[in-house]
Image (cartoon, grey):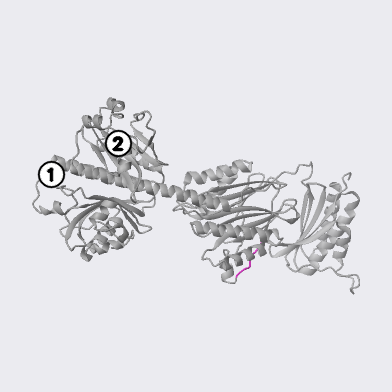
Amino acid sequence: MADRGASALSLPDNRPAAPDTILALNHVGSFDWDLDAGLFRMDARAHEIFDLRPDEYDGRATSLAVRVPPSDAARLDAAVARAIKDGSETYGAYFRVRRRDGTVRWAHSQGAIRRDGSGRPRRVVGLVRDATRELADSPARAPRTAQEEAFRQQAGVVEAVSAALAHARSVQDVIDALKDTHGIRHLGAASVVIGLVEAGRIRLVAEGPTESFVPGTRVTRIDDPYPMSEVVRTLVPRFIESPEEFAEEYPILWPHITELHITSAAYLPLIAQARPLGAMGLLYSDRRGFSAEERAVLVALGSSIAQSLQRAMLYEQEKDLAQGLQQAMLPRTIPSVRGADVAVRYRAAALGRDIGGDWYDLIPLPGGRVGAVIGDVQGHDTHAAAVMGQLRIVLRAYAAEGHTPATVMARASVFLDELDTDRFATCLYAQADLSTGVVQIVRAGHLDPLLRDADGITRRVDVEGGLPLGLSAEFGRLEYPVATLELDPGSTLLLCTDGLVEQPGADLDDGMRDLAELFAAGPDDVRELAGRLIAMAEERGGEDDVALLLLRRREPEEPGARGRLRQHIVPGDPDALTRARHLIGAETRAWGAGERADEIELVADELITNALMHTEGSATVTLRLLTGGERRLRVEVEDSSSALPRRREPQDDGVSGRGLLLVDMLADAWGVEARGGGKAVWCEFRMDPDG
């Protein structure tokens, strides 16, 4: 039997499924088939029908082949494959079971195929029963009796309830499914109560009709004289067939429910793996007694509910464990950043323990800079979260050492490759100097960032990027191009993982456009904006984690501190160089440079001349007023060459190449930064506060 095949063997003459003569139907079991995992879970009754002990069965559909003849198994595979292919919601058919003593019995299975939003089959839930006596009268069958027809309807209700429970992922989901399907009502019950065992007591978790519970029974002891306590203690169903029997057996409870006009009741233990999870009571007001067939159906219903409860409890435990692990891997707090507002958000996927390796980080760097990281480790499991935690730590360490963004990314890739894991990771690292607004970005197979200007104009920042972390080291391609942008005061940078933009059946570019529109229309406050973006992900749901980081450069606090001059100069144009000199002198004096204006103009001229002479390309000069603490004026000259300038000593021959000596003498600080495929030489001058 194929794992994604069928459990619905057809009779040779393709007779349709029909639970008719029910004399042997005290043998009714239930199953839940997870098609993705290939797990075919059965309750104790189903194990009996297949004549398999729990320790003999590994939970795989293929393992049932030891009991199902090959010819029946082949028809079974074909039948379910056909049902899956043609979009059927249910199936039902007969098949043979060869027991361990060599005898052959007939069985019947009916199930419901559950599909996801895209129509893909994910689960099959249903019933399996011994049909040997039923087929003994074939082909000449007597018409169904009223009792047989009623049982057929009840069996259908059990199937419908089991199908509804297949998607329950929490205890509350189980309770809601029982209420929403109206299955209990179709079974004829006037009232239902469900209790779960917790710390040696039974806690009532559902009752109906509303407020029909007995006072004082919200929490009871297992040894209390109530029918629900009894079935939990004994693990045996309790069928109460008359009001007289109820009053005699449970004199403490009976006076409190007389107004419900109960005539009979069925209390079922909810058992999973020989352990009582709780109990369910069905109270009837229009019938007395239960036939053997009706008891079998109710026991099958209890078994199906118990399996769903156990699955929901395990799901909740695993989800709590997985989310706790991932939260422990993410930074507990985000440091405050001078000159910027930062907001981060994380949303776990709506899956059990299948969490992802998404992460964010904000790293204080030397020189007042800050590093912003967003990343996603391949996979959705606890291993992905563990790899994420290690990768976050080493990337933070490399960045804090003062390495360039490209070096940080390359070293992180080598680390992941040497970690001896089959996982890779996408990542984006942005290093921002908030005093100047210059942001350098490297991308390892990740989404491009989005940038919103102070006036609301939003664009996608095109970053060339390299291979994902781990893969670039494996294939020896550790080069990560650096993109440079300017984050003006009031502008906001958005980094996110693909869970924020990916939608089933939609193109990624469409998702980016939708995100850009929402980003552009959002509030200026980054915390409110982050909340609105993550709310969109919550509303859409999805099976992927979401992480996002917003970095907004603040408006300067000092009046007139937004000064900036930017001039592009091409080689061979002496007029452009002359104009730049005049502009620099005029602006620096207007900004209050005072006596230092001549020094600034001279240093800027030297840096521009060096760039034009030694790179054979154009140069861009930028002047900025820096705020925060003392007022400073910063000069940057960018060119397209990655070759670093060399300061010559006084004893060197020649008259050229000594511009950096002049810079070193006149400027208060200077240095060189990589910018994309080139560099920027910068210097800073303290401004006279009385200027």
Q: Quarter holding the C terminus?
A: top right
Relative to 681, residue 208 above or below: above
Which residues fall within the magenta stretch?
A: 477-482
Asked whether the viewer can see residue 512, the reply is: no
Q: What amino acid type is highlighted by mark number 2?
A: Pro
The residue tagged 2 is: 227
Residue pointed to by mark 1 = 144
Q: In the shown orientation, is residue 653 left or right of residue 456?
A: right
Which disc number belongs to residue 600?
Answer: none
Give percent across and percent down for residue 221. 38, 36
Q: Residue at x 44, y 47 (%)?
A: 316
Q: Between 305 and 568, which is closer to the camera in this rendering?
A: 305
Q: Amino acid at mark 1?
A: Arg
Q: Outermost residue, bottom direction?
A: 653
Asked whether 215 or 547 is in front, the reply is 215
Residue 287, picture quadrant? top left
Q: CA distance from mark 2 to mark 1?
A: 35 Å
Q: Secondary structure at mark 1?
A: loop
Tell me where residue 562 appears, x and y as whole percent: 76, 46
Q: Nearer the viewer, mark 2 or mark 1?
A: 2
Q: Secondary structure at mark 2?
A: helix
**Magenta highlight on residue 394:** no
Q: Residues within 10 Å of mark 2 (few under 14, many from 20)?
A: many
Position in image of residue 206 (x %, y %): 37, 36
Of callouts 2 and 1, the N-terminal one:
1
